[in-house]
Amino acid sequence: MDQIEAPDASRGANPFGVASLIAGVLLLLLGAATIMLSPAIPMLLSRFQLPYQFVGLLTSLPQALVALIGTVLGIVGLLAKGRRRVAAIIGTTICASHLVTALVGFVGSQVVVLLLG
């Protein structure tokens, strides 16, 4: 006779996907904070006597780092066999799009500095 086994509660869980999703939510919060604090950037630059080149670093670099980590975690979560992929798909999508946006924003700000400076 076959015995019925109780399902393992952790089977199918995807910790990398969940971590990627958490990184994606953190990126959404960082993006909102950047938008809300952007009027203060000229004041911060003058107060700390920083050149305009630092705007790209101040706004894009933290988001790019979190987005890179979240994208890698999401890809690992997508490649895990026998695991749920919904959180990994959502997290990877949010993080990868923020990574592209952060890199384009950083490069764009540096181009503006070169053209105007």
Image (cartoon, helix red, strand yellow):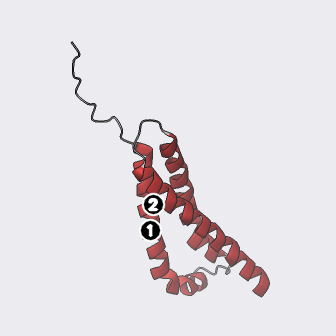
Q: Amino acid at mark 2?
A: Gly
Q: Nearer the viewer, residue 46 or 25?
A: 25
Disc 2 crowd, CA 10 A, few/some/many (<14, 14-19, 20+): many
> Extreme top residue here?
1
**Can you tell which mark lies on residue 24?**
2
**Discs 2, 1 touching: Cβ within 8 Å:** yes
As drawn, is 6 to the left or to the right of 27?
left
> Extreme front residue here?
1
Q: Is residue 7 above or below residue 98?
A: above
Q: Amino acid at mark 1?
A: Leu
Residue at position x 56%, y 73% in the image: 59
Q: Position of residue 82 (x, y in %)?
A: 42, 36
Q: Is residue 84 above or below residue 95?
A: above
Of the 4 image quadrants, the one containing the C terminus is bottom right
Q: Is residue 15 above or below residue 27?
A: above
Of the 4 image quadrants, the one containing the N terminus is top left
Q: Nearer the viewer, residue 2 or 92?
A: 2
Task: Report whether residue 20 is seen.
Answer: yes
Q: Position of residue 15 (x, y in %)?
A: 40, 43
Disc 1 crowd, CA 10 A, few/some/many (<14, 14-19, 20+): some
Residue at position x 62%, y 70% in the image: 57
Q: Secondary structure at mark 2?
A: helix
As drawn, is 88 to the left or to the right of 99?
left
Q: Position of residue 65 (x, y in %)?
A: 56, 59
Q: Position of residue 16 (x, y in %)?
A: 45, 45
Residue at position x 63%, y 81% in the image: 49
Task: Report whether residue 19 is seen.
Answer: no
Residue at position x 53%, y 47% in the image: 75
Residue designated by label 1: 28
